[in-house]
Structure formats: structure tokens, C-alpha cells
Image: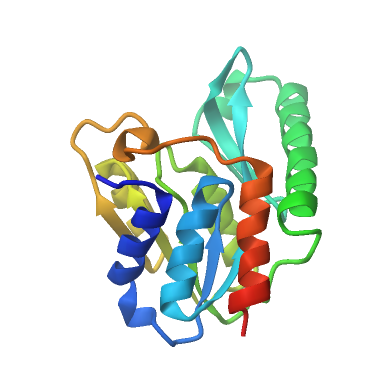
Amino acid sequence: MFEDRKDAGEKLAKALKKYKGKGVLVLGIPKGGVEVGYEVAKYLDADFSIVVSRKLPYPGNPEFGFGAVSEDGSKFIISGYEEQLPKELVAEIIRKQELEIKRRISVLRNGKPLPEIKDRTVILVDDGIAMGSTMRAVVYLCKNKKAKKIIVAAPVSGESAEKEFSGFVDEVVILEKPQFFSAVAQAYENWYDVPDAQAASILQRWETTLKH
């Protein structure tokens, strides 16, 4: 469906062209959403930064997340899981992810605060939405910070994710919704885990060459 994240970002940007030159804020979710978000922000002549959200890994099965936490402490936990796990264990998992969030803010955003979100149109970008927990935690962050309008945007997701988000954000823009969707990677010809240094360099490139 997409050659790589740059290709996906360019295509997603065109689907969002009505926001071009409108002073919107694009926030990429690391690490995969950073390059996609960069291409979107560049095309839209928008403001751009990185917003950090972390999956809460299920004990014994870290690939599966039972929710997520974002950098302002906003949490989303999938219904039913809080009752299954001891409160102390949930608190410990959240604490570990909050430490990782702090590390990522330091490394990827050079410790800088998020841009002002209040009363702004915010486009939240990831390279794809699987379960949607990390994106949902960031939506809560934007709601807490009183964003005027929230748009969830990604090159690919399952159909259920799109339906779910359309119920509580202003707009959802998804390019591809494969019938048999199991992982974001399946939508990309060239897929790899993004290293810290690459994600940080994308924001640095933005700030040195494109920031208004």
C-alpha cells in the first residue's frame, strides 16, 4: 500500500489538504508517526512537534497492550482489564511507562514542552492504528488541554478503529482499511523500527529548516 513512511506521509498530507495554510498543529506519535507527521506538517504549512504516548504492556505478553498513557498522565485502559490485574501491578506498569515517556521527551524533543494546544486545531498522526490505545491516550491529552478541534490521521487502520475514533474526535482520516488487518507493518513495503536518533533528527530538521 505504501512504499515507506515518507510515501505514506505525502499521501496522507494530500488527504488533509483542506487544512493547508490554516495554522494547524500536527503532532506525530513516536516513533513511527514522526516521519509521517513531518511530511503532513510540511505539506500543510503547519506547526509540528512530537507527542509521546506509551502502550501499557500486559504482564507476560508485552506485545499486547491493555491500554496506554500519554505524557500529561492521560490514561486509557481497555474495558475489563483493570479488574483482571492487581491495582499495584497496574500502577507499577504505568510508572515504568511514565519513566520511558520522560526519557523520550528528553531524547526526541530535547526536553522541550509541547506547543500550545488550547483553542487550536490539532492533527494527531501515527504510521497506522492497530488497537488504537496510544492514539486514544493522546486524544485525551488534547481534550484535557482544550484543543478546539481534534483530527486523528493515519495511513492505515482496521475498520473498527476508524469507527471507534469517529465517535469521540471531530474527524478521522484513514487512507487504507484492509479487510484482514493484523499489523501496521503489513501496509508498508519498507518497514523497520525507527531508532531514537532518526526520530530526533526529523524534529531537528524541522526546527532548523522549516519552522516559521
Give the answer, above or below, for where 75 lies relative to 57: below
Give the answer, above or below, for where 203 lies relative to 129: below
All told, the count of numbered labels is 0
Give the answer, above or below, for where 91 lies relative to 202: above
Q: Is residue 64 visible?
A: yes
Give the answer, above or below, for where 21 lies relative to 122: below
Split into 4 quadrants, where in the image is the C terminus? bottom right
The spot of residue 143 in percent (x, y) is: 57, 65
Q: Is residue 150 visible?
A: no
* Residue lying furthest top: 60
Residue at image x 76%, y 66%? Answer: 113
Residue at image x 43%, y 48%? Answer: 127
Q: How is the image coloured?
A: rainbow
The spot of residue 186 in percent (x, y) is: 32, 33
Examine the image and state in which quarter residue 172 appears: bottom left
Split into 4 quadrants, where in the image is the N terminus? top left
The residue closer to the viewer here, 181 or 86, is 181
The spot of residue 208 in percent (x, y) is: 68, 74
